[in-house]
C-alpha cells in the first residue's frame, strides 16, 4: 500500500471511531474537549513542530515566500465561492478556512517519499505557514462574530495557534533549546491533539451531508486539492525555486485540510457539523489526489 494511503487511513479510522462513540460519550462532552484541544494540545503540537528543527534565514526566505503565496491564493480562490456558501458569514468562514489550511501530520508523512535532506524542509514550510493560515482563519471567524476591529486584532494576536507557531519559529531560528523534561512534556501533549480532534470530528459528523456534496463544498475541495497544488507548481516556476523546495511546496499545497479547522470553528461558534463534513471529505478525496501530487513532486525533487 502507498505510504500516503497508510498515512491517511488512520485518520479515517479515528473519525469512524469518533462516530461510534456517540453511543458512549454524551454530545455535551465534546465542547470542553474541543476547548482543551484549542487552548493546550494543538498549540503544543504546533510549537513542537516549529521548534524541533534548526532553521536558517535562507530556508525561511525560500519556503516562506512560497507557502505564503500558496495560502493566500487558496484564501482568495475560496472567497470567490461566497455566493454558494451559507448565508451566515460565521458558518461560511468555518468552512472557508478549510480551503487554505493543511494537515501538518499528513504533510510530514507524505514528504518522506523525497530524499531526507529535501523532506527536512517540510518543517520549515509548516513553521512559516501556520502563523499566516491562523491569522487568516481567526480574522475570518472573528468577522463572522461581528467583533469590533480592536476585538478582532486582540483575538488574532492572542490566538493560541498563532502564539505557539511564532514562539516555535523563534526558538528554531535563534537555536533556543528548552529543558529536556519540558520539551518531552510539550511533545506528549502534542501527540494527543490530532487523535482527539479526529474523534471529535467523527462524533459531530453528519454522514448524510458527507455523502451529499454541495456545490460549495465541491468548490472548496477543488481549491484545496487541485487549484492549490497547481498554483504551487506555478509559484515554484515563477520564483525559480530549486528542485528540493519546489517539491516540498507542491506536497505542502496538496495535503488535505487540517483537523484543527474543526477545533477553531467550534471555538468561535461556527457550524461544527459542516466543518466536520468538509474535513472528512477532504481526507477521503485526498486519498485519491495526494498520491498523484506526491509522484509529481518526486519527479521534480529528484530531477
Image (tube, rainbow, N blue to C red):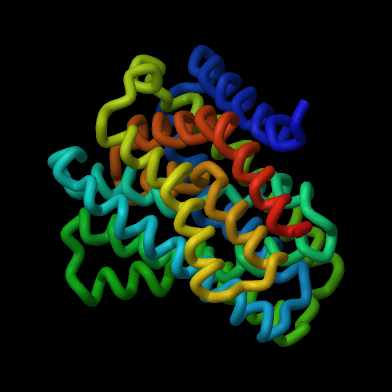
Identify the residue at image location x=72%, y=65%: 244
* Image coordinates for residue 166, horizontal then vertical, percent: 56, 75
* Image coordinates for residue 61, horizontal then vertical, percent: 60, 81
Image quadrant holding the N terminus, namely: top right
Identify the residue at image location x=64%, y=81%: 170
* Image coordinates for residue 182, horizontal then vertical, percent: 78, 67
Q: How many marks?
A: 0
Q: Can residue 5 be seen in this view?
A: yes
Up/down of 247 relative to 107, above or below: below
Q: Is residue 160 visible?
A: no
* Image coordinates for residue 236, horizontal then vertical, percent: 55, 67
Image quadrant holding the C terminus, namely: bottom right
Is 201 left, or right, of 210 in this rendering? right
Identify the residue at image location x=61%, y=68%: 127
Up/down of 143 relative to 191, above or below: below
Residue sticking out furthest to the front: 303
Q: Considering depth in this image, is 224 or 10 the residue closer to the camera? A: 224
Is 245 left, or right, of 72 in this rendering? right
Up/down of 30 relative to 79, above or below: above
> Quadrant of the rendered structure where residue 157 is?
bottom left
Identify the residue at image location x=32%, y=34%: 217
Q: Considering depth in this image, is 265 or 215 the residue closer to the camera? A: 215
> Quadrant of the rendered structure where residue 75 is?
bottom left
Up/down of 184 relative to 221, above or below: below
Amino acid at each position: 500500500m502507498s505510504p500516503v494511503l497508510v498515512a491517511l487511513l488512520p485518520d479515517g479510522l479515528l473519525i469512524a471511531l469518533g462516530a461510534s462513540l456517540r453511543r458512549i460519550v454524551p454530545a455535551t462532552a465534546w465542547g470542553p474537549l474541543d476547548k482543551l484541544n484549542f487552548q493546550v494540545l494543538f498549540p503544543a503540537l504546533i510549537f513542537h513542530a516549529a521548534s524541533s528543527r534548526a532553521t536558517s534565514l535562507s530556508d525561511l526566505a525560500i519556503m516562506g515566500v512560497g507557502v505564503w503565496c500558496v495560502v493566500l491564493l487558496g484564501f482568495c480562490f475560496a472567497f470567490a465561492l461566497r455566493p454558494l456558501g451559507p448565508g451566515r458569514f460565521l458558518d461560511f468562514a468555518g468552512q472557508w478556512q478549510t480551503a487554505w489550511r493543511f494537515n501538518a501530520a499528513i504533510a510530514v508523512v507524505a514528504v518522506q517519499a523525497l530524499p531526507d535532506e529535501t523532506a527536512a524542509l517540510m518543517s520549515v514550510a509548516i513553521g512559516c505557514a501556520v502563523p499566516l493560515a491562523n491569522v487568516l482563519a481567526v480574522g475570518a471567524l472573528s468577522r463572522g462574530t461581528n467583533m469590533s476591529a480592536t476585538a478582532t486584532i486582540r483575538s488574532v494576536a492572542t490566538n493560541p495557534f498563532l502564539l505557539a507557531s511564532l514562539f516555535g519559529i523563534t526558538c528554531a531560528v535563534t537555536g533556543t533549546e528548552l529543558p529536556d523534561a519540558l520539551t518531552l512534556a510539550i511533545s506528549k501533549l502534542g501527540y494527543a491533539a490530532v487523535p482527539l480532534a479526529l474523534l471529535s470530528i467523527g462524533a459531530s459528523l453528519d454522514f448524510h451531508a458527507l455523502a451529499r456534496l454541495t456545490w460549495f463544498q465541491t468548490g472548496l475541495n477543488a481549491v484545496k486539492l487541485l487549484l492549490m497544488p497547481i498554483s504551487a507548481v506555478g509559484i515554484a516556476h515563477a520564483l525559480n525555486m530549486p528542485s528540493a523546495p519546489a517539491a516540498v511546496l507542491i506536497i505542502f499545497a496538496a495535503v488535505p485540510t487540517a483537523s484543527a479547522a474543526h477545533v477553531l470553528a467550534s471555538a468561535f461558534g461556527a457550524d461544527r457539523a459542516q466543518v466536520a463534513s468538509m474535513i472528512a471529505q477532504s481526507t477521503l478525496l485526498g486519498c485519491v489526489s495526494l498520491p498523484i501530487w506526491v509522484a509529481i513532486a518526486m519527479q521534480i525533487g529528484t530531477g
